[in-house]
Amino acid sequence: MASTIPDPQPGVSADDSEEPPSSERAVRVEAHGIDHIPDRERHGHPRQLFSVWAAANVTFLALVTGGSLILMGLTLGQALAAIVIGNLFWLLTGLLAISGPSAGTPSEVITRAMYGVLGNRVNNAIVGWLISVCYFAINLAAAASAAFALVEMTGITANTFVKVVVVIVVASLTLTIGVYGHGLIMKLYLPITLALSAVFAVVAVAVFQHADFGYAPAEKLTGTPLWATLIGGVALMAAAPLSYTTSADFSRYLPRTTSPKAVLGWTALGGFLPSVFVCTLGALAATAVDMTDPQAGLRKLLPGWFGPVLLLALVLGTIAINALTSYSAGLALQAVGVSIRRSRSVIVDGVVAVALTLYGLFTAGFLDTVNSMLEVTVAIVGPAMAVYATDIILRRNRYDGRALMDESPQGPYWFTGGFNPAGTVALVCGVAVAALCVNNVYTGPIATALGGIDLALPAGLVVSALLYAVLARGLRKQTATS
């Protein structure tokens, strides 16, 4: 079942290598969707990626997940270990980002090389669109809950009508960034990063003053329950970086000659450092106050005047992360085959996410919904990221963006009936094995046999990567002779 995949090296004409004047790069509604970005429109520096990912990871959700590790019964030391290990998966997010400058297309198109034209539509419908919209809804619920508290501080009762209005307003601000697209993201996210860093520096001082650095639960976990909780905690932390199988969306405008190491490094650092910092604050806060209600708990540690500032920062941070999510979800909808402009596809995604958010806020427990959603999605996004990363390594990050745009049966990425057997089999088998290992909303047979230990994350990653490496051996033969 070997896959013979072309590895062309497209030439770069003198016209394509010209960078447009800065006036042509003024912020406006982005014209490009999933189409190839010609070299003459490439610009920017990889260091700009740091602020993009940093702004998107100083969020209320990170505080919630960090605090939840303590609520799960871990000691502070164990929680911090889970935070660091789980966030190391930002290296994979960085690795995927290097394919953007190489191909000049978003991740949603690059993955045609792994799954074929039609197989990639299925991949984008689930991994690209559905999961992105679900994350949008979860983050929007987090932002809304902070905004509700802010509204209450003004003396307005946050009844059902007010809550619906707040959700719509926050979603509208988020979608505005997503609609304008790449240019606005690059301009806004550095000042957003600086503003959020200043706010969370104040939070850090207050949390450090009250935290119990020797914290341990009254009844320490041991044996199988301890390992099950630790591995679950790592999966919870890893869910954020693993959800960004679309990191090339934000690097594809960089020049083709951009250093892959720089793209990987700035992307990974932009995700890792703020995620570890904010998740750690959540864990430390949980040693001093009850984080089952994170907003109320944090306000006990902070001066009264700072409460509204923190809530505004939480809303701003969540808008930043959701703008990226809505942007990628819009591209995914196009890649599924829906004939719609990118700006309009973002709005469609927003409408669906708002509906899911309102359902989640009024019918389900927020914290339980967050944990269940994040832990279960690693069974899908983990294998998807493993296939993508393995393809980059086997192909030595050589992608022909123009060829990837060819969706015809005669095109180089049609494979067999529109599906690449290597990627399809690797992904399906990885997800199937991960599903057998899940211990969350249900318990798989492998998790049962292991006493409740959930190995969905490592099992899915390893199985998908190894299977793809074996089945796509044609890639290695080809790159060896190029």
Image (cartoon, rainbow, N blue to C red):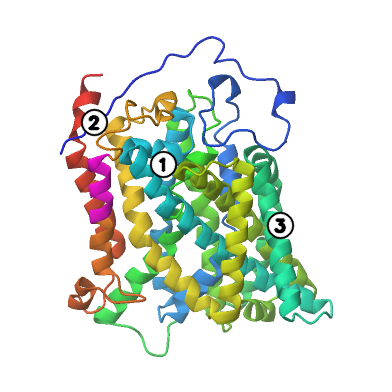
Single out the mark in the foreground, 2 or 3: 3
Residue sitting farthest toward the top? 14
- For label 1, the crowd category at 10 Å Cα-Cα, with few meaning under 14, some 14 to 19 and many 20 or more, is many
Res 440 visible: yes
Determine the CA span between mark 2 and mark 3. 44 Å
Classify mark 3: helix, strand or loop: helix
Q: Percent from the top left, x then y, of residue 198?
A: 70, 57
In magenta stretch: residue 402:
no
What's drawn in magenta, residue-wise? 420-429
The three-letter code of the residue at mark 2 reads Leu
Residue in the foreground of this view, choosing between 357 and 415: 415
Tag 3 residue: 172
Q: Is residue 315 rendered to the left or right of residue 272?
A: right
Q: Is residue 236 rendered to the left or right of residue 208?
A: left
Classify mark 1: helix, strand or loop: helix
Tag 1 residue: 96
N-term-proximal mark, 2 vs 3: 3
Res 303 visible: no
Tag 2 residue: 475
The answer to whether residue 472 is above or below residue 51 is: above
